[in-house]
Image: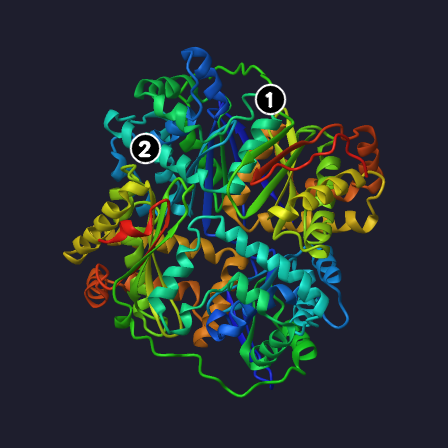
Amino acid sequence: MQFRHEQLPNGLDIVAEVSEAAHSASLGFFVKTGARDEYDAISGASHFLEHMVFKGTDTLSAEDINLRFDFMGASANAFTSEEDTVYYAAVLPEKQHAALELLSAMMRPALREDDFVTEKQVILEEIKMYDDQPPFGADDRCRALFFQDHPLARSVLGSTSSIEALDVEAMREYHQQRYSSDNLVLAASGAVDFESLIKSAHQLCGEWKPSPPSNRKVQFASTKSGIVTDVITREQAALEYAVRMSPGPAEDTDDRFAAKLLAVVLGDDSGSRLYWDLVDSGQAEHAACHHHDFLDAGVFVTQLSCEPETTHALLDRIVEIYQGAENGLSNNEVDQARNKLLSRVVLAGERPRQRLFSLGLEWAHLGQYRSVPDDLATLDKISREDLHRILAEWHLPASASTVLAGPLLNDSTST
Amino acid sequence: MKQTLQTVTLDNGIILLGEFLPGVESVSVSLHVAAGSLCDSLATRDTGRSCCGLATLAGELMLRGAGDRDSKQLVAALDNAGVQWSQSVSMSHGSFAGAMVSRQLPDSLKIYADILRRPLLDQHQFDPARQVVLQNLAGTEDDPTHRTMLTLRKAHYPSPWGLPSEGTSTDVTELSHTDVKNFVTTFIQPQDMIISVAGRLDWPEFVKQIEVLFSDWQGQPPNQISVGERGEKICHVPYDSQQTHIALAWDVPPYRDPDSLQATAALAVLGGGSSSRLFTEVREKRGLCYSVSAGYQTQRDLAAAMAYSGTTADRAQETLDVMLHEIAALPGTITEDELDRVKARAKSGLVMQQESTAARAGAMARQWFHLGRIRTLAEDLERLDELSVESIENWLAKNPLKEITTVSLGRDPLEVPDAVSP
């Protein structure tokens, strides 16, 4: 694997991890924009714009884009999160230029009014689809409670009313502001011809204009979150779904790696403390803990699904499990979790499509490259004491926001 | 691209499949024993009680301790070896799989041999194991898409193919520890078991180790599944949701039928990519839904095309009408361009499969199960190259679509026309 980086005069960063053994090349534009960059009147605009990018340019229709991707046999898609909007395509190496040509054209969409009206219906369908599915909006509600007035409180999808009220002019303005050359990263992984990639990028993206620098970071005072509980009642649901958030390390500190290892010890899908206590015993359908890091904040997210009447007892039990972890972790469980993560890093390293996201997001957020050996070395260095320090510093049992969704009624939550 | 494919059949009927993949450090192994959920129906016949979910419960209990390791020690051993492991039950197979750095393969094979040959089936683990299966079933109750597809399978396939692999809560509640022990004794047998391995691999060493671990194991599972009735052709499940979920199924040839390539190519034109007819007409032009697709689901002897969409209740009828229209309009209208796109997507998929040891091990096992052999990548690509619009149209003309099973889940039932016409 070889890492390459180049910057165009207009500030567009191009990064690649070239692997001679790969059979395919993956390419992606990582736009440094997401729900956190929105304000009330354009809530959901980043995600809606992601859909509109597939609706065509001044010279290409939506159908043209779909046809071209399918003609090149591309596996192409996009996603939007709180902080990023990512467009990607995995293709056979000989299609590298064609894929970049299409993806780069899409970054300058036409945003036509009639497409906007049709696609608005698709977005509204997507909102309804998620609203019908577990955890029935508990994740969005919990994020809003936990982050309060911080930009990370915003919903990626937006709401039915915010999407209905959005007009195409506001989206054009948002695109103008956020899709400037220096706010995008072009990343590539796998069987990439880097020289040709740079040449194509100069030709296809060289005319894009940069924008004045902006600061996206906003200090997050996690102490303001306090203990907040809310309930979304869905009478016909079979299970109760709980989402719990408590503060953790942000991405600008090396503690993010220890936090991820800690989350595997506490709440990986199998073999973790939550798993043995709640899932293996058949008390919960699902119980897991993950650590997510953002530009200026971090969060430990605990998810639980179980029979409604057991929810409060199991949430209390989770707090006890976290308290138990504060009393000390064993070397064996830390090593077991580490071995799992090491293996995941090695296996993901063999798949260009998975490496693309690590590569692009790391550069978009921190302007740095981390190789597979870097990740392995970092994991190897984390000690049990590091995890104890994280536990002491972030004190998982306290200061959490919790939202339940399911048959329970709001008045049954007064714990 | 030079390919190294290996196959060996042991005297006891275990089939070993292997492919060395250059440029990777990992290896993936998958073990498929002929103890899938179709065997639930044989247990039903033998016990006189409906046993839907028994194979799934057996799989859950088998992982809870084997050989000289208890449940926790077993998971710790796999995790410490860095094995990304999984266990699943399909209609035909109970499957255990693992992906790992290649030096861990010998140790992990010993663990898998213990799971298959020496599961503890600890009585104390039975209640929690059953509880896990019941929790999972309760979880699927809350997933409207999953419920829709389960209803479609039940309506379209003859019994027992239409029964849910994960079981039903009524049946699982009644299953006993003895039921599971009998199931394991009867159905977990070496005959027809497939062990597939792909990645950084020393094939002779692998075969030698498998012989040590498995060659003294003898037995054959019973295999006389009787074909039962199909369900209702039109079915509505009342459900208080914002979206109405629509699912359609019709018969197509199984994978081992030489015509399956024509059928799956036609299906890909209909609903296989973002330029497919369903995606274009239902989502792109009309904005009726977020998701719409059509796919192929094959068993060894029967297969179905299945199409799905989820949409707001008041637009569900239009969505169904457009979907049915597009299905009926397919014969006689497939273009060269459409076939070129299907071929390009299939070709990319085949080549990219070579990048994932887990995908490759799984694909080889599936191909062996359906065909009794593994095709090389070159052979698969050649078959694609030879596919023509004419051959697909000929197949469509000879096999006109007679009947579509239609399932909806949502507030109101939909009107399903008697005849399908373009």
Measuring 77% from the left and 44% from the top, which residue is drawn there?
B385
Asked if one can make out residue B393 in the rendered structure from this viewpoint, the answer is yes
Exactly how many numbered labels are in the figure? 2
Q: Amino acid at mark 1?
A: Pro
The chain ID associated with circle 1 is: B
**Residue annotated with mark 2:** B131
Q: In which image quadrant can residue A402 be found?
A: bottom left
Using the rendered image, report if marks 2 and 1 lie on a common chain.
Answer: yes
Label 2 element class: helix
Measuring 56% from the left and 55% from the top, which residue is drawn there?
A126
Label 1 element class: loop
The chain ID associated with circle 2 is: B
Measuring 34% from the left and 33% from the top, which residue is drawn there?
B63
Q: Does B270 sit above or below residue A188?
A: above
The residue closer to the viewer here, B58 or B289, is: B289
* Image quadrant occupied by the C terminus of chain B: top right
Return the x and y of residue B117 as percentages of the image width and height.
36, 25
Return the x and y of residue A296 as percentages of the image width and height.
37, 75
Give neighbour class at mark 1: few <14, some 14-19, many 20+ (Cα, 10 Å).
some
Return the x and y of residue B267 as percentages of the image width and height.
71, 40
Instruction: Give the residue furthest to the front.
Output: A411
**Residue annotated with mark 1:** B158
Position of residue B153 in the picture relative to residue A247 (left or right): right
Whether the residues at callouts 2 and 1 have beta carbons within 8 Å, the answer is no
